[in-house]
Amino acid sequence: MSDPADRAPRRPAISVVFATRDRAVQLRETLAAYRAVSSSDLEWELVVADNGSTDATAEVLTAAGNDLPLISLHVGEPGKNRALNVALAHVGGDLVVFTDDDVIPAPDCLHAYLAASRRWPSDAIFGARVVPRFPIGTPDWLASPAFEFGTTAFARYEPASAEGPVSRHPYGPSFAVRRSAMTDHRFPEHLGPQGNAYAMGGEAGFLRTLAADGHRYIYVPEARVEHVVRDEQIHEAWLVRRARNKGRGQVYLPSRKKPRRLFVAGAPLRLWLATARAALRYGIARLTRNTKRRVRYGVKYALRAGELDERRRRRRTPID
């Protein structure tokens, strides 16, 4: 007779977690990629939080539960970070991989994470190599690693040539954290996607609090994922809006710059002046047909304007 303990479900080695909202078509492709993940000798689970979708997301998740180790949750209140925090209460893996619904993992991605966690037993934060997958028609200059806003716009993450400690924190499309290191740490719910206009920085805030506990960032290039770039994300309007959200989020991240002394209406005078200069340059650039130039100056203006807006907003409504 077999021991009842042998029939008990085995605890997963890895939990993969992401939130989704109204992206049923993309979600199907992402879930299909997880079906192809090399997992025959790996106990793992997939925890997906549906953050109030109104499309076919629920049906897609129901179908996926037939052939994936899926835990599907519904979190109606908007906010990606809020949904992730709810999902964290349901994970069982010792290593938790955070990702997005528009990120396609390589078939051996989970194995690569697990192997790296064993090679670095004293470390707790691991970042995958994130390569953007651009739509047809993307200008070469925009897809190039030399595009300085590409890391923020498309989450390109390749901070080193080899595995090991790096100074730059991993990006949202894919990073892993030992569950034992998270304890009471959670994602800041006032940051991150919750509509078109929001302050970016949820993952950065979460990871920096972990780093403050003494944990290093370990880059794992063998854990490779593709971040799907949508058609609208290669256009000026989206990039400028993204930069504005980034600027808003900068207010909540520690700064290495010297404290600014002179404030006007809740913001440093230097920021007001820099925003005005950037607005003038962007206004002149918009008179041209040079898209590269418009994006360059539009991003610089939006970063400053976003920070200015958030500083003024925070002055009116402080965050606890």
Image (cartoon, rainbow, N blue to C red):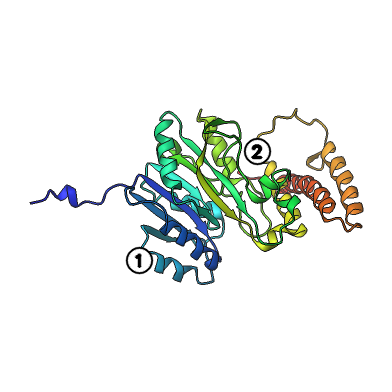
Indicate the secondary structure of the residue bearing disc 1: loop
Mark sitting on residue 66 = 1
The answer to which image quadrant residue 22 occupies is bottom right
Q: Position of residue 220 (x, y in %)?
A: 51, 38
Q: Looking at the image, which residue is at 53% across and 49% down?
A: 225
Q: Which label's residue is closer to the chain start, 1 or 2? A: 1
Q: Position of residue 148 (x, y in %)?
A: 73, 43
> Along the horizontal axis of the image, is 1 left or right of 304?
left
The answer to which image quadrant residue 119 occupies is top left
Three-letter residue code for mark 1: Asn
Q: Nearer the viewer, residue 117 or 226?
A: 226
Q: Which residue is mark 2?
A: 253
Mark 2 closeness class: few <14, some 14–19, many ≥20 residues within 10 Å: few
Mark 1 closeness class: few <14, some 14–19, many ≥20 residues within 10 Å: few
Q: Is residue 38 above or below residue 184?
A: below
Q: Is residue 115 above or below residue 140?
A: above
Q: Looking at the image, which residue is at 80% across and 30% down?
A: 261
Indicate the secondary structure of the residue bearing disc 2: loop
